[in-house]
Image: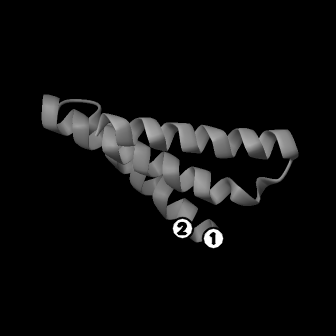
């Protein structure tokens, strides 16, 4: 799970950096989708370790909002 989180974070940062450097923001929705999946993984991990009273209750709705908005952007 840790390796997947690192790969998702690096891919989102790489795509975002590419967009900022080249001023080509056509890959923005892909970056947002990766960020939403990353937040979902963090939320699942928090929920497993600390239960209901943790940051999981913040990360899960935020990840769903980000994923839905990224899917509407395609």
Query: Residue 72 sits in which quadrant?
Result: bottom right
Q: CA distance from mark 2 to mark 1?
A: 6 Å
The percent coordinates of residue 21 (x first, y second) are 83, 39
- Can residue 34 be seen by looking at this rendering? yes
Q: How is the image coloured?
A: one colour
Q: How many marks?
A: 2
Residue situated in front as seen by the camera: 59 or 6:
6
Q: Which residue is mark 1?
A: 74
Residue at horizontal 36 percent and vertical 49 percent from the top: 61
Q: Is residue 51 left or right of residue 39?
A: left
Residue situated in front as seen by the camera: 70 or 20:
20
How many C-alpha atoms fall within 10 Å of the one at disc 1: few (<14), some, or many (≥20)? few
Quadrant where the N terminus sits is: top left
The percent coordinates of residue 30 (x first, y second) are 60, 57
The reply to whether discs 2 and 1 touch (Cβ–Cβ < 8 Å) is yes
Q: Which residue is mark 2?
A: 71
Secondary structure beneath label 2: helix
Secondary structure beneath label 1: loop
Q: Is residue 27 left or right of residue 72?
A: right
How many C-alpha atoms fall within 10 Å of the one at disc 2: few (<14), some, or many (≥20)? few
- Can residue 52 be seen by looking at this rendering? no
Q: Is residue 62 left or right of residue 32?
A: left
């Amino acid at each position: 799970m840790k390796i997947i989180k690192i790969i998702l974070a690096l891919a989102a940062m790489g795509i975002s950096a590419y967009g900022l450097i080249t001023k080509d923001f056509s890959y923005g929705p892909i970056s947002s989708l990766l960020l939403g999946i990353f937040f979902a993984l963090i939320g699942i991990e928090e929920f497993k370790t600390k239960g209901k009273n943790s940051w999981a209750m913040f990360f899960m709705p935020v990840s769903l909002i980000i994923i839905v908005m990224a899917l509407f952007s395609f």
